[in-house]
Amino acid sequence: MKRRGLLTALGLMLALTGGAGPVAAEAPLRVVATFSILGDLVRNVGGEAIALTTLVGADSDAHVYSPQPRDAMALARADIIFVNGLGFEGWIDRLIASSGTSAPVVVAATGVRARGMTGDHASPDPHAWQTLGNAMAYVDNIRDGLATADPANAAHYRARAATYTARLKALETRTLEAFDAIPPARRKVVTSHDAFGYFEDAYGVEFLAPVGVSTEGEASAADVARLIRQIRAEGISAIFVENVTDPSLVQQIARDTGVAIGGRLYSDALSGPAAPARTYIDMFSHNLDALTRAMTAGP
Ligand SMILES: [Zn+2]
């Protein structure tokens, strides 16, 4: 990162003249993000000033991931590493240690109020990215991390973070208005695993799930039977499959209860290019539209 120090003066000049474009370094900052959703937030802040490697790609489950040799190589060459934290990437500490990297590691969820321990495992709920307010905190942490690692481009990162945060704020307003228009009794759905706790708290939607906050767990027959009783008793609007989990269990629950499948939610990963969750904002918009459609159409 020393080569970047030489460019600080130039970056300062650009900042003073109002230029927020990236400084033409001899090579972009090498950045690693652990999973696709975080990678998209980092890309939005970093723009053309960074070369981004994302370890766990689209439609892949970062709770359970087997790191590849290329992941250790990416970490070894990185100038800065972004992780979610909150225990989401259980494999990352060993991978970082074995890679020998000396790059700073930024926990994107720093400062987010973690949801309490759920289930019998005393661990925080890692899915903090599922509220727009938390995504804004991630963006602040990403901006500060990039600006520290690459001070020559600090103005560029600040400008891009501000622009992107304005888009998140607009989507937050739309989200609050959309759920406000739906009676609370209709705001109940089922998903595969417990990935929407933060979303639930922020937007007044109740999510039931047969599997806990990590996809590592498996639903017991008793858990499923309890959930089915709850679905019948409480009047659930829809059941959703997820892009990172096997849909067969929730499909079975839908058959057993006669509740409609409301579509697919993107919980822990973005979609590939042919599906509607290619970016964080697209993912959130898709989930919002799928949920509100099911809640207004249901039985
Ligand atoms: Zn998850």
Image: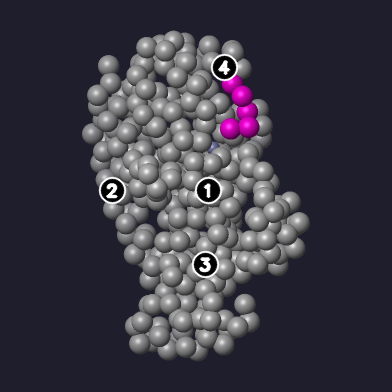
Q: Would you name the residue on which mark 1 appears?
A: 57
Identify the residue at horizontal 50%, vertical 89% (top origin): 9
Instruction: Ligand 1: give its quadrant.
Output: top right
Q: How far apart are labels 4 and 1 at the CA level?
A: 30 Å
* Residue that mark 2 sits on: 173
Sequence-wise first label, 3 or 4? 3
Q: Report the residue at 37% width, 65% height from top.
A: 162
Q: Nearer the viewer, mark 4 or mark 2?
A: 4
Amino acid type, label 2: Thr
Q: Quick check: marks 3 and 1 in contact, CB under 8 Å?
A: no
For the question of whether residue 190 can be seen, the reply is: yes
Q: Which residue is mark 4?
A: 223
Mark nearer the N terminus (3 vs 1): 3
Q: If you read the primary sequence from the N terminus, does the residue marked by circle 4 or circle 2 appear first?
A: 2
Q: Circle 3 sits on which residue? A: 51
Please report the residue visible at 44 percent of the width from the left and 28 percent of the height from the top.
241
Q: Amino acid at mark 3?
A: Ala
From the top left corner, tell me how far across and down residue 160 is, in percent. 39, 67
